[in-house]
Image (cartoon, rainbow, N blue to C red):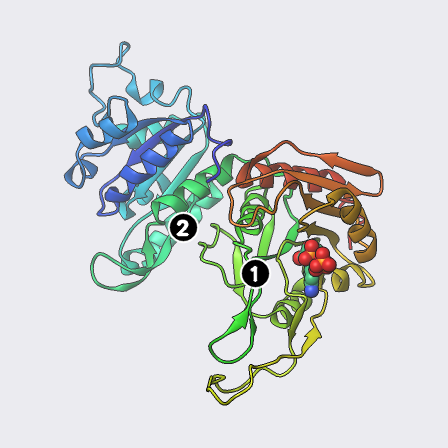
Amino acid sequence: MATAELAGKHLVLGMTGGIACYKIAELTRLLTKAGATVQVVMTEAATQFITPVTMQALSGRPVYTSQWDARIANNMAHIDLSREAGAIVIAPASTDFLAKLAHGMADDLLATLCVARDCPLLVVPAMNRQMWQNPATQRNVAQLRADGIEVLGPDSGPQACGEIGDGRMLEAAATYEAIASFFAPKLLSGRRVLLTAGPTFEPLDPVRGITNRSSGKMGFALARAAQQAGAEVHLVAGPVALDTPWGVFREDVQTAQQMHDAVMRSVADADIFIGVAAVADWRVDHASEHKIKKAADRALPTFSFVENPDILASVAALPHPPFTVGFAAESGELEVHGEEKRIRKKVPLLIGNLGPLTFGMDDNEVVLFEAGGATRLPRADKQTLARALIAEIAKRLPDTSLIR
Ligand code: CTP
């Protein structure tokens, strides 16, 4: 999880009435764990769904619900509570509250805080699909966007009322990611990033295959960091058990050939290509259509292999390639193999893992190989490292006017 953007930030978390209030307990925990201070303000309706006592215990601060609360020394809660705030986040944001915001109403503490604010406002809508689709709601949301208010979500899927559709609140983790993303420096604003991540799976028969130990964590962390840095991100993923980072477009593939084809279909639109996937170098020449059976009187199976296309080298060899970045998984002599691999694949930047292979682990230490020499980055968890790598890539990009 991204934490650096939120450490030391002060947020006002405004809750309005809706069943999604239960998600805010978890959101508060994620925000405080990331080092943010969270000042909860609840509308009267929100207190019907979750108690201020719960929110106070989770945020570690007194919760405010009324404009007439006498605990603020100058009795100006509507001004004081958001004074040091990096943002006000309204989650869940009800249909009614969106309407109030669109019209600048100030008839309770939370609405007044929003009108009197001097900081960004983020709203996380939560409602039944018909309420979301109602033309009045859509008008109000368009007005909020025009007023510079960030609208996060909504999500689509089963709703508390039993219906299915758009309107449900983003899950707590996705809301957290979206808030972190809002605060991240926009180093890749306006850029399109295409990435590969994870292993590939090369079938031997319908039930067996050859794969490798890549978890996809580094590639997914880079996709998340690129999205948070303002890029439009397309992630081509091999078989992994990871959630799609918020705001990232994901395309799932199995084999190296499918990964190659997916990349080649989209690469013309990309400004940056990052090949993080551990792509199988070979596939079985003719995978069996039927499960290979064992029998006492049968010889052990043998397989002949053919080489898979090299995705990274194919991208780098395009007439107008995007800024192309490779990764190197080596089990020894990185200094020798890293630079040799960069030159062989003709990429301007290759990132090598230092030390033992780190498949599946959360920490990593890398060296950047480029024409000017090698640079080592300090050991860090994969999300911190991903942010640092995105900053390094952003520094090396050609001027936007020159790119493609
Ligand atoms: N790569 C690729 N397509 C392949 C093989 C590798 O796009 N068929 C990319 C990887 O995504 C990575 C880089 O090439 O960015 C290096 O991958 P790696 O497995 O370290 O190198 P190989 O080319 O496979 O060389 P070797 O296995 O001999 O080390």
Q: Residue at x 44, y 39 (%)?
A: 179
Q: Is residue 209 left or right of residue 259?
A: left
| Res 175 seen here | yes
Residue where numbered disc 2 is placed: 153
Q: 354 and 15: which one is in front? A: 354
Image location (x, y in percent) of residue 225: 56, 43
Q: On the rendering, which quadrant does ligand 1 occupy?
A: bottom right
Residue lying at the far left of the rendered structure: 48
Q: Is residue 91 left or right of residue 55?
A: right
Label 2: few (<14), some (14–19) or many (≥20) C-alpha neighbours in 10 Å: many
Number of residue marks: 2
Image location (x, y in percent) of residue 174: 41, 47
Secondary-structure class at tag 1: loop
Image location (x, y in percent) of residue 181: 50, 40
Residue where numbered disc 1 is placed: 212
Place residue 27 in its image quadrant.
top left
Q: Earlier in the sequence, mark 1 or mark 2?
A: 2
Locate the C terminus by quadrant.
bottom right
